[in-house]
Image (cartoon, helix red, strand yellow):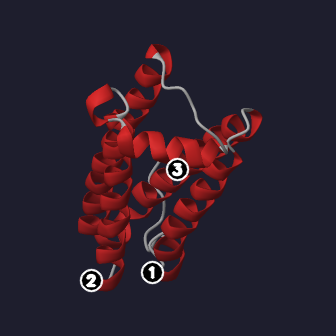
Amino acid sequence: MTTFWRNWMLAWCLGVGLFGLVLAGAGFAETSGPAQALLDRMSGGALLLDRPLRFGIGLQGALSIAIAGLAWAAIRAADALGPDGAPIWRLLLWSMLAWFVIDSAISCANGLWLNAVSNTVLMIALLVPLLASGVLRSATPARV
């Protein structure tokens, strides 16, 4: 992977982590302002951050931060392996596709379709470097 695509992937991970930090802020009344504004925009009105929703959104933020870190770890490992890293790249892609489908379906089912739109942007931003760099193609035969 070239430096350009590696930097793209780093920016992607940082963006996911920053988004997670905003969501994690919903877990506490004192830090929920940015998350409240985002959620109000996505829901099309004022969304009440009661205790269960505060817990769920805050937890989602923590998980988004973890996804960012784990994705960066996978990216670094796959990149270090060069052509032998293709299976790791594909696993990263399949994992993110699973998240995309499930998260977007839940979002749409609950009237938060703008979240599905942002998921689509995030998924495209991941697909661009994976497809353009050629890292999904294995140079060596698969091991059994």
Q: Secondary structure at mark 1?
A: helix
The residue that mark 1 highlights is: 133
Residue 90 appears in the figure: yes
Q: Position of residue 91 (x, y in %)?
A: 48, 51
First reached walking from the N terminus: tag 3 or tag 1: 3
Callout 3: 10 Å neighbours few (<14), some, many (20+)? some
Tag nearer the camera, 3 or 1: 3
Q: Quadrant of residue 36?
A: top left
Q: Is the residue under label 1 in contact with that under label 2 (CB below 8 Å)?
A: no
Q: Residue, x 45% and y 30% (percent of image)?
A: 57
First reached walking from the N terminus: tag 2 or tag 1: 2
The residue that mark 3 highlights is: 96
Q: Amino acid at mark 3?
A: Met
**127 relative to 21, above or below:** below
In the drawing, does residue 74 fall left or right of residue 105?
left
**Disc 2 from disc 1: Cα separation:** 10 Å
Q: Secondary structure at mark 2?
A: helix
Q: Secondary structure at mark 3?
A: helix
Q: Amino acid at mark 1?
A: Ser
Quarter in which the N terminus is drawn: bottom left
Q: Nearer the viewer, residue 56 or 29?
A: 29
In the drawing, does residue 26 fall left or right of residue 134?
left
Q: Nearer the viewer, residue 113 or 92?
A: 113
Residue 137 appears in the figure: no
Q: Quadrant of residue 24?
A: top left
Task: Please give the label number shown on residue 3.
Answer: 2
Q: Amino acid at mark 2?
A: Thr
